[in-house]
Image (cartoon, rainbow, N blue to C red):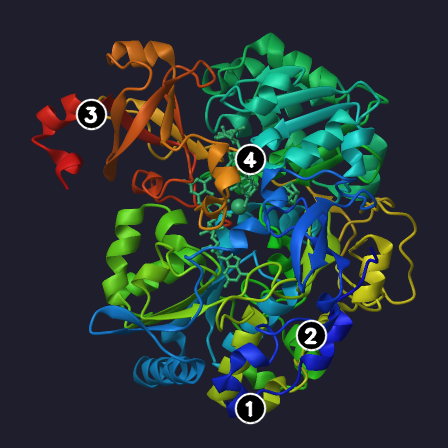
Amino acid sequence: MNKVTLDSVLHRREGPLTSELLQRPGEFGLGALPEVAQADSTASSICGFCSTGCQLLLHLWEGEAKTLTPDRSYPVNTGMACPKGWEALAVLDSPERGTVPLLRKEGELRETDWSTAADTFCDRFKRIQEEHGAESVAFISTGQIATEEMAFLGAFAKFGMGVVHGDGNTRQCMATSVVAYKESFGFDAPPYTYADFEESDVIVLIGANLCIAHPILYQRILRNKRNPEVVVIDPRRTETAQVATRHVAVQPKGDLELLYALAFCIVREGRIDREFLQANTEGFEDFGVFVQGYSPEAVTERTGIAVEEIESLARMISEPGKRVSLWWTMGVNQSHEGVRTAQAIINLALLTGNVGKPGTGANSITGQCNAMGSRLFSNTTNLLGGHDFTNADHRRKVAEVLEIPEERIPDRPSLAYDQIIDGIEKGTIKGLWVIATNPAHSWIHQKRFRALREKLDFLVVQDMYHTTETAQTADLFLPAAGWGEKSGTLINSERRIGTIKQVRRSPGVALSDFRIVQVLADRWGCGPMFAKWSSPEAVFGLLKKLSKGQPCDISGINDYAMLDSAGGIQWPLPEGAFPHGPERRLFEEGKFFHANGRAKFIYDASRALPELPSEEFPLLLLTGRGSSAQWHTETRTKQSAVLRKLHSAELLLEIHPDDAAAAGIVEGAKVEVSSARGAIEAVAYLTASVQVGQVFLPMHAATVNQLTLEVVDPYSRQPAYKGCAVGVGLRQAACRGSGGGIWDR
Ligand SMILES: Nc1nc2c(c(=O)[nH]1)N[C@H]1C(S)=C(S)[C@@H](COP(=O)(O)OP(=O)(O)OC[C@H]3O[C@@H](n4cnc5c(=O)[nH]c(N)nc54)[C@H](O)[C@@H]3O)O[C@H]1N2
Ligand SMILES: Nc1nc2c(c(=O)[nH]1)N[C@H]1C(S)=C(S)[C@@H](COP(=O)(O)OP(=O)(O)OC[C@H]3O[C@@H](n4cnc5c(=O)[nH]c(N)nc54)[C@H](O)[C@@H]3O)O[C@H]1N2
Ligand code: SF4
Ligand SMILES: [Mo]
């Protein structure tokens, strides 16, 4: 079979939208088949689940992709895929797909057409803005649509609609890494390339469960021929910890003190890379003084790690001549002190000079397929292209590239996600547009979040499925095409940009997010402002121009065809440069993105957990990914019969056998898990993989966030999903004790 690019064919179909076409959307692009799909062929596409960014080959016959295989030639996954990737096509076929727009009338969501939907969107949001000011409408974007789509969405919302406040689900996930990198390196720049997994002598995974959340990255570790030490720092003995060479079972949020103690030992033993520090960093002397307060002896109680273990780990990560890489994910980011913890990791890499060389780095692993795209191009926290809304030069540059009046660009940053929610509570935000995220399941402290629904005058939800918890509460539901039904680019964890292709019809009259924004912008009356935003590839051309001169400069990428033939391209690639080889890392010259070229040591005293265990709630609840077959709120993965079989159908509470025995709980017992905010039902799963005093719940059940405590990191405003106090009791006992409680509801 020939490998073909569908985009050239699709491109021809893309053009201005007329009212006539709006009545028959199935005929103007997404409903119709790409011409090339009429023939049997194979198209390549980056997987649309996680940020690993595996490339899949989609095999078409009779007009649509019917099967897929992982691409052996792609540098990321080299022929591998996890269960979600293998089932990526299966989840598209479902009766739960949104096929037509739905509008709430007399309390019920009823079918409508795109013209009515677009008119209603514009009328209602305009009316709210007229009554309460432009800032009374906000949007919540996502890391799970194509870069071109999120850029168009953010540009239309902010420059077209006059919205100031827009954030995304990346706040739940990556805000901590973004702020940590920006402050330490001068730009949000994960420095690594996946080959570093294969080239390290010591791999330290902090709050990252690769075997479940990034299984193909774990496969990359298995290919390491240097016989590496693999250290997992995680309160739980996770699947990854079980196969590591060392598990450091830190107490929840003991990381910051542990990392400072490691720095203390390294400084004490003089195992720092003085030459690198002097040439390329600032503040290391003061940091050396600061960590004097964090000797192994001083932190052993808080961290739960013995003095000798801290000392030997410090020696392992500072051994001269060894390549050490430090990787982190949500165990670090989702914390009340996440930013400083991420920076404590960065500080260790700087201290030991493990930066910019093969097998090294302070490396944040991203989560969603295009979280990296949203960090640079969603026009939410940053102005398009990693720019700053408050910087007049940046606003001028963006206005010039996009040929829009400068006054259309807000000169203030957006409120963060939690502040938007506070705005709803206070009544300053009255209208909300939610795209490709499901906050009525995933946002922290669900009871509060859901109670705020009635405070909104108008809620628009744009999703592939009309059944999500959030879509069910919408006033207007816009049916979106999903991965496989549209084209564009995604950026993976190692900054690699790759393309996605349309290989399927979208169901009914569902449209790509790109098309939806185009329709809405047109109806809003800003069609001319976005005349150049005619197709995903045209927008890619604009993004290239916007990135010029930035650390994430991609102006050297000609087009989608170049991305395909190069096996994806990692940013930066400035004009005139060529991607030499398939793997590139940042900071090879030791130059960082601050004006003085130096990386900064940033640190703060550690703080206690915001909610400590009490008599009523004696256990600490950790939450996270449950299996490699489940994706977040499960709107997609639950649609596959294969994926459903790969995990328990029940919500399992992982509890230590000692804690279970003390509460009279046996394996398989129905239990009530309660916190100060709510109580939910689960089934006990006795395992010593959690420590005494701690329990774990997967985030995939909608009830879990009824328990979580609404606390955010003060610098990143990322919610601290991991670590709140709960109690666990037998369900029957709970019924008797509480006179019914949640079980009667
Ligand atoms: N199968 C699957 N894969 C996914 C996803 C999915 O939903 N399903 N989601 C994707 C996304 S968006 C993301 S962000 C990533 C998340 O990927 P990960 O961050 O690896 O996943 P989590 O399970 O949320 O958290 C990782 C670990 O943090 C640990 N942890 C909790 N508290 C602490 C602590 O105080 N200190 C330390 N050191 N560790 C702690 C937990 O025990 C858990 O094992 O996964 C991505 N991949
Ligand atoms: N307790 C707890 N809660 C957590 C976490 C945790 O560890 N513990 N982790 C947090 C993290 S890291 C994350 S990233 C969030 C994830 O939280 P969410 O973003 O809410 O989770 P998803 O289920 O991925 O939601 C994505 C939505 O987009 C829809 N969708 C998919 N593709 C498309 C598309 O192309 N277009 C449109 N319009 N819609 C589409 C899907 O159907 C789905 O409804 O959860 C956070 N919540
Ligand atoms: S590891 Fe991530 S990108 Fe690769 S197939 Fe699985 S979900 Fe897709
Ligand atoms: Mo995430």
Dot placed on the residue nearer the N-terminal end, 3 or 1: 1
Distance from disc 3 to disc 1, alpha carbons, whole Å, reads 59 Å
Select label 2 or label 1 by which is in front: 1
Helix, strand or loop for disc 1: loop
Dot placed on the residue nearer the N-terminal end, 2 or 1: 1
Identify which residue, 698 or 297, lies in the foreground.
Answer: 698
Q: For the point 32% across and 45% down, which residue is it? A: 445
**Residue denoted by label 3:** 731
Select label 3 or label 1 by which is in front: 1
**Residue denoted by label 4:** 628
Helix, strand or loop for disc 3: helix
Helix, strand or loop for disc 2: helix
Distance from disc 2 to disc 1, alpha carbons, whole Å, reads 20 Å
**Residue denoted by label 1:** 18
Quadrant that contains the N terminus: bottom right
Identify which residue, 167 or 227, lies in the foreground.
Answer: 227
Dot placed on the residue nearer the N-terminal end, 4 or 1: 1
Q: Is residue 725 above or below residue 171?
A: above
Q: Amino acid at mark 1?
A: Thr
